[in-house]
Amino acid sequence: MKTLVIVAHPRIDESRVNRAWVERLKKQPNVTVHELYKNYPNGNINIEREQRLLIEHDRIVFQFPFYWYSSPSLLKEWQDVVLSYGFAYGSEGNKLHGKDFVIAVSTGGPEGAYRAGGYNHYTMSELLRPFQAMANLTGMRYLPSFHLHGARTLTNEQIAESAEKLIEHITTV
Ligand SMILES: Cc1cc2nc3c(=O)[nH]c(=O)nc-3n(C[C@H](O)[C@H](O)[C@H](O)COP(=O)(O)O)c2cc1C
């Protein structure tokens, strides 16, 4: 099984969580780490290259920090241009059919904020619904997502531990 981790963090050099995850994932066999903001600092996405990467892998992971209850904007742009008609959807758009899809997301808010009655009112499963709908439409299998909450208050040890859990999650879910 070949896994493609598409990372979307606009300021990875200032990141604690996503940078630690990237560094750990890069050591993992059969995992390709693909950092969107590093590859496309001007936002000009190479569609053919991205589609080729998708075809070459069996499991697709979107990794990002939660920004305004969603992903940073380059990942949305990536979806808009890469998941095109005839490639990802439409009567002949079957290139992603049967692939696995996983989200790995870090949040500033604590776990308890993401529930009915909590500070953010909604669960992560509810807020990530557009990604689930994307997986459904493109014929990918939406697997349980990986969440790390309360990013600001985590110790370096907790972040390192989360990187190991992420590896376990994306290789076994
Ligand atoms: C523009 C912006 C929007 C954010 N929106 C949210 C949000 O909607 N919910 C949340 O829990 N945290 C939010 N955060 C906090 C980030 O998710 C958090 O800082 C990040 O996950 C930490 O990961 P990092 O160390 O890799 O940067 C936001 C941060 C920024 C800069």
Image: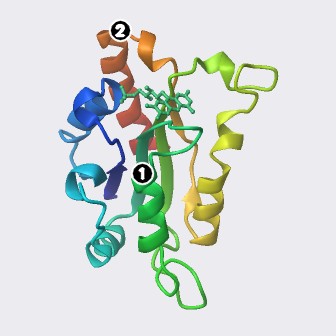
Per the rendering, the mark at residue 155 is 2
Most foreground residue, 93 or 118: 118
Out of 58 and 156, give the one closest to the viewer. 156
Q: CA distance from mark 2 to mark 1?
A: 25 Å
Q: Which residue is drawn at the image coordinates 43% and 50% (left, top)? A: 62
Residue on which disc 1 sits: 61
- Determine if residue 32 is in view: no
Give me the residue at 21% from left, 34% from top. Answer: 23
Q: Nearer the viewer, residue 96 or 70?
A: 70
Marked residue nearer the N-terminal end (2 or 1): 1
Q: Quadrant of residue 154?
A: top left
Quadrant in the picture for residue 9: top left
Q: Is residue 23 left or right of residue 164?
A: left
Q: Residues within 10 Å of mark 2 (few under 14, many from 20)?
A: few
Please tell me whether residue 112 is drawn above or below residue 41 in the rendered image: above
Instruction: State left or right for residue 114 relative to residue 2.
Output: right
Q: Secondary structure at mark 1?
A: strand
